[in-house]
Amino acid sequence: MPDETQVFFDSGDEKVLLSKEAIDSKVKGLGQEISNDYEGLSPILIGVLNGSFIFCADLFRSITIDCEVDFIKISSYGDAMQTSGEVKLKKDVDAHLKNRHVIVVEDIVDSGYSVNYLRERLGKVEPKSLKFVSLLVKEGTARVDYSIDYVGFNIPDRFVVGYGLDYAQKFRNLPAVYLME
Ligand code: IMP
Ligand code: MG
């Protein structure tokens, strides 16, 4: 009896929402844009764990200017497919962000609660600038007003996994972004 992950891998192309090639070229483009916008500013990327760790690593490598990286860990989903609405801090940033140009790296924005939580929390340490990049933004699912500065793809309101995104901690290692049943 194959495990769930294997079944998923074998399930065919029809569930692929974004191919590895589409993601790669988008991430390169975002890296170029950020490199142009932050020339001479030595920004620091803050990857939001766990979901953005793969996107953050690829984006970081596609940035061609002086740049640093650190991480913050929050949670709002538990193992569910719906946000609980309550964002919890699991691990704080270690780097000193005061007077730095900070770029928060998210995997996906859904309700907007996480982005607003991070904007408020990181804003308190007085960065010189604070911007957000998200690989994915779900359309029509915002429950609060939020703003994102760089967006990879706008996607329909479906649960997606792969390229770092999970369902109950599974499927993060899939190379593309897939629609969950
Ligand atoms: P928000 O606070 O509702 O905007 O949710 C943001 C977080 O929820 C993301 O950073 C993801 O970790 C998680 N999330 C939202 N939608 C999905 C999805 O379709 N697949 C996997 N994780 C998701
Ligand atoms: Mg996340």
Image: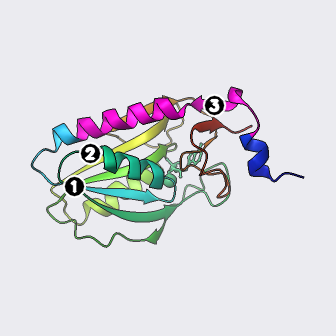
Q: Tag 3: residue type? A: Val
From the viewer's perspective, is 162 left or right of 45?
right
Q: Tag 2: residue type? A: Ile
Q: Tag 1: residue type? A: Cys
Residue at which label 3 appears:
16
Residue at horizontal 54 percent and vertical 45 percent from the top: 163
Q: Are marks 2 and 1 in contact (CB under 8 Å)?
A: yes
Instruction: Establish whether ligand 2 lies closer than 8 Å to the Cβ of label 2.
Output: no
> Total of numbered circles in the picture?
3
Q: Position of residue 90 (x, y in %)?
A: 48, 70
Disc 3/disc 1 C-alpha distance (Å): 32 Å
Disc 3/disc 2 C-alpha distance (Å): 27 Å
Prevalent SS, magenta region: helix
Q: Are marks 3 and 2 in contact (CB under 8 Å)?
A: no
Instruction: Establish whether ligand 2 lies closer than 8 Å to the Cβ of label 1.
Output: no
The first of marks 3 and 2 along the sequence is 3
17 up-or-down from 102: above or below: above
Q: Which residues are magenta?
A: 10-34
Residue at the left extreme?
Answer: 40
**In front: 161, or 1?**
1
Residue at which label 1 appears:
67
Residue at the top extreme?
Answer: 14
**In front: 77, or 56?**
56
Mark 1 Cα within 10 Å, few/some/many (few <14, many 20+)?
some
Q: Position of residue 175 (x, y in %)?
A: 57, 42
Q: Position of residue 179 (x, y in %)?
A: 66, 35
Residue at which label 2 appears:
63
